[in-house]
Amino acid sequence: MQKIKLMIVDDHQIVIDGIKSSLEEFGDILVVGEALNGKEALDKLARQQADIVLMDVDMPVMNGFETTCEIVKLYPTVKIITLTMFNEKSLINKMLDAGISGYLLKSVGKDELYKAIRQVGDGKQYLSADIALSIAKPEYKDILSKQNTITPITPLSTREIEILKFIAQGLSNTEISKKLFISSRTVDNHRTNIMKKLDVHNIAGIIRYAIQNNIIE
């Protein structure tokens, strides 16, 4: 598998260090650069090739939106994933309009971060579940509901549909287990079976199925 060259841009060095540490176990992600603001990122991109820029929004000197606009203009082959604490609909739409390929909250785990990087590296979009459900513009909901139409081979059980609803709402395994009075391991097993039955590989795929089949609005 070809390695993805990643640049991390965040105004907190501890965040950059944490991301680098989290991605170390995945041998196909190579961190080729880091920057503390957008201007520094642009300076480094002029000297160092990157496939994906993983970038915060709220930064001094040059923020994530301004930097995204410049990267799209100057380096159109470079993909951008927003990694931020902000979940405002207006900001999500603004960043999508600017040309990002992914949007994640800083609360995501390392496995989902890795999946997002790989999916964007494969030329697709990645929106975490909570972000996908926050999107205001109908055209972005269409990305989830119409793109890569899913036809399940095996119908889901009543319990699986119940769990799917909670997953699509952005609940964690622990939160679902408390609602249904079952163990987190059982929820995880159901989640795995749901993905296998629907032939999807991330939360966005689950949300697409839920929207297409009117399980969620």
Image: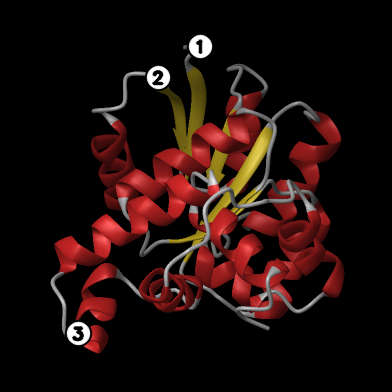
- The residue shown at (54%, 60%) is 206
Q: Is residue 12 visible?
A: no
The secondary structure type at the circle numbered 1 is loop
Q: Position of residue 75 (x, y in %)?
A: 77, 28
Which quadrant of the rendered structure holds the C terminus? bottom right
Answer with left or right where residue 199 lies relative to residue 39: left
Q: Does label 3 or label 1 sit earlier along the sequence?
A: 1
* First in sequence: mark 3 vs mark 2: 2
Mark carried by residue 178: 3
Residue that appears at 25% across and 66% down: 187
Q: Mark 2: give few (<14), some (14-19) or many (20+) Cα within 10 Å.
A: some
Q: Nearer the viewer, mark 3 or mark 1?
A: 3
Distance (Cα) linking label 3 and label 2: 36 Å
Residue count near mark 1 (Cα–Cα under 10 Å), binned few <14, some 14–19, many ≥20: few
Q: Residue at x 63, y 30 (%)?
A: 43
* Amino acid type indicated by mark 2: Asp
Corner quadrant of residue 185: bottom left
Judge from the rendering whether residue 23 lies leftward or rightward of residue 207; answer left or right: left
Q: Is residue 44 above or below residue 47?
A: below
Between circles 3 and 2, the one closer to the viewer is 3
Crowding near the residue tagged with mark 3, few <14, some 14–19, many ≥20 C-alpha atoms within 10 Å: few
SS class, disc 2: loop
- Residue matched to label 1: 2
| Residue 63 appears in the rendering | yes
Give the residue pinned by disc 2.
28
Task: Please tell me which residue lies in front, 26 or 159.
Answer: 159
Residue 55 placement (x, y as % from top left): 54, 48
Label 1 near label 2: C-beta < 8 Å? yes
Residue 179 in the image: above or below residue 55: below
